[in-house]
Image: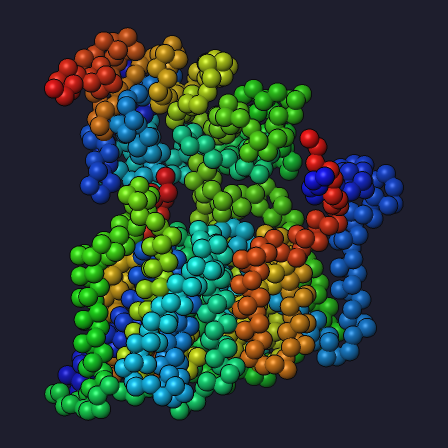
Amino acid sequence: MLTGTIIYAIINSAILALTAIGFNLTFGISGVANFAYGAFYVMAAYGVWMLIHMAHLPYPLAVLISISLTTLAGALMYRFVIIRIKGQTLSEVIATFGIGLTVLELFRYFGFVGFEYTLPVFIDKSFMIGDAYVDAQRLLIVAFAVALIIVLWLFTHYTHLGLAFRGIAQDERTSLTFGMDPDRIARMAVAFGAGLAAIAATVIIPLGSISPEEGYDVLIKALAVCIIGGLGSSGGVIIASVVIGFAERFTDSYIGSHWTMIVSLAALLMVLVVKPSGIFGKQKELEERI
Amino acid sequence: MKTRKERIDRGIKARSQDIFALCSWREMLYLSGPRLLPVVICLLLPLILGVYWQKVLMSVAVFAILAISWDILSQSGMISLGQALFFGTGAYCAGIMNHYWGFSPLITLPLAAVFGGLISTVLLLPVLRLRGVYFSMVTLIIPLMLVRVIEATKIFGGTEGLSGMDPMPSAGFEVYLILIVFLAVLFGFRRLMDSDYGLVLKGISDNDRSVINAGINIYWFKAQALFIAASIAAFAGAFMTHVYMFVGMPVFALDYSILPIAAAVVGGPGTLAGAAVGAFILVPLSELLRGIGGLRIVFYGVFLVVCIVALPEGIFHYMERKYHQFERWVEVEK
Amino acid sequence: MSTPLLETIRLSKSFGGVQALLNVSFSLRQGELLGVIGPNGSGKTTLVNLITRFVKPTSGKVLYRGNPIHQLPPHKIVRLGIARTFQMVRPFYQLPAFKNMIIPLYSPRAKGLVGGRYGDRDAMALDLLEEVGFERDAFVAYKPAGALPQGYLKRLELAKAIALQPDLVILDELFSGLSLAEVASIVPIIEKMRIQGKTIIMIEHRLRELFRIADRVIVMNYGSKIADGSPDSVMEDEAVKCAYLGSETDSGD
């Protein structure tokens, strides 16, 4: 039982991390809290489904196209909506929220709800580890999460664009003086975030089915992980995912499955009381603004 | 010949400034009309509407209160994506008090308002010190999390909720109660936000270091604004519990969070009257659109985005401007 | 010798890798007018931010009337009687000038002035603004703050500080952006504050105007205090001359 729980906890943490990374990246770099994040996640999944079932494209191609389209959608959202209101928190929040809402409810309205909306798993096998059955897809998720984190780390430390991202994240004004265009970088940050949501979707959705509800769930999870870990901090996201992932799984195994959400909520409230800016949060309140 | 648009105050506005308003009936009517008209309409409408539209009117008043609550928070620098949190907390407080302890609605309503407000304020106290986005995020996810918690732990009736609440003394009482509360909230808090106290709140939203520099504890003031807004929203929730004689998970639904924002944004953020106007437009509209089901929310979403990007002024400001000023084309002087 | 009104003891602040202030210690007696000068970036505003606790010190202490204040939240420090103006003046631009005074008059420090009756704040605001030179008969105080020239905006800042009835007033570059005539018209207001017994710290770049009224001057450079004395003695100081003009070895041969 213990090995099984630990394995599933690792998997759960990987899922949470994958889900939250995109949102965290967008916010950390451009300061835009993309409340349409859940919508991009679901959009990508539906995109793959439609490409497979209506355009009859092979699975890998469908995945690639869908991810690209979602990334493009993110850039477009920035270019046409966010750029007009960037900096005004109220408008940003409402606009992204409104867009996310519209997209998700549109899917619901057009009837994209039902058990037939699933994506096939990549490899259809199961393994026995210790005393627990683990299917290949779940293991893939862990591998994916680790790989993605490493790739992102390398990207932000060794490529021009990645370093530009970090520069703007640390100090927008100074980066401006180095000739970096904050609008362009912000657009890419939003697009990247959307793309990461899409990647997460294509790997995780095969575990269940696609539904607009997922959009809200994903947003909640991403927000919770980011708040607990500290908005803008990748290290925080990882630690928070591990903490919540393990807490949820162990609660599920040893106490009862209906307590998992309470544990998450309790973790969130605890963080808010003890260190509201998150485990690795860098919200310096007043200091930043003088 | 080039022309430009010129906006000038109407003559009657200039004539009715300060004490000169007492000059004649016309001036007094000019000033008091826009305030008395909604009051009179609100008080008369229940008498002429049928039962169905009376229910709609109640809904309008409830959402108007939620929208006003949202606007108070937004003027104080806190953007709430979770009016449902306050609404639901108030609803459950009233439901619990009535179901388990048998308090009558006349007692549960005020108590639920206060306790609902207190609980919500305490929950949100830690994020008041952080950047505004945190407040938005936390208000968004806590009600959604609470829904799942209730579903999972089955407390307070779980998915079935609590039913069999006591109704209010009469249908007429219901309608008039909510309308009077709405009017009181609208005019009362409008007065508050226009006063020096409101100026401090708006100052905190605009330039908080300036307010700190005056020796004012901005977090205490923010907490006060939060308590006020949360309490009135909680009252609305408690009210609905007794109207439907039921409280359950749906009180934390996104609907109660989104519509108030849409109403305030469409009607004109920054004035409580705008929020009310927005509710008066959107709620009946949503009733009429009931036929198209889920598309309704799509409609709100689109409406919301278009308004916030293209017409941030809002309908109320537009009306206000028209009432006080007129426009004309004049020649551009050389 | 009574305790100094304000004392800083080895006050330091580093922002990440940047050492903005290093071991700055000085003391201030009641009724003094202390000038703080130094090249740009020498840490003058950081020093004020630390005293008023808008920023947390990395190490060191600040004592006010002998009591440590460096752990208190900024609004409490204001309530103890310390008021400051900001270098970057940011009023509420759409509001009339006198409405800008309402928030300071709402402060607990302004209780004596306002008298507790509703509506008195407007009248008090107009009175205070008149005292700093807002001509009453020209209704200057009713103009939106965004329409006022810099001289009036600086005076508005000063009035906001005075409204708090402070014992210690810290003026951060009050004279910057003002013409000689405007400076000359503000100096009497500062003199009046001194006569009323207030202690004043002035951060300035306008040395000539400052030296006429300052009792003592501190010179900052690269986050450290390099001189502390009367205006004349400070101007003779070699280190000070180096800081402003550069030394002979700096000419880069």
Q: Which residue is drawn at 28% across and 8% down?
A: C232
> In the image, is residue A66 above or below residue C157?
below
Vertical order, A209 against B210 (above or below)? below
Q: Which quadrant would the N terminus of chain B be assigned to in this image? A: top right
Residue C86 drawn at (x, y percent): 41, 31
Residue furthest front as drawn:
B1
Determine which quarter of the picture holds residue A143: bottom left
* Viewer-proximal residue among A173 and A237: A173
Report which quarter residue A226 is drawn in.
Answer: bottom left
Q: Residue at x 53, y 61 (%)?
A: B230
Quadrant occupied by the C terminus of chain B: top right
The answer to whether residue C118 of the structure is visible from this angle is: yes
Q: Quadrant of residue C136?
A: top right
The residue shown at (57%, 69%) is B300
Q: In this view, does A134 lie above or below A218?
A: below
Q: Where is residue A110 in the image (x, y as percent from the top left)?
A: 51, 83
Tell me where residue A47 appears, x and y as whole percent: 39, 79
Viewer-closest of B326 and A71: A71
In the foreground, B307 or B224: B307
Q: In this view, does A252 lie to the left or right of B241?
A: left
Viewer-nearest residue: B271 or A71: A71
Residue in the picture at 53% in, 46% down: B201
* Residue A224 at least partly seen: no
Q: Is residue A68 above or below residue B155?
A: above
Q: How far from the left and from the top, in percent, is residue A136?
A: 20, 86
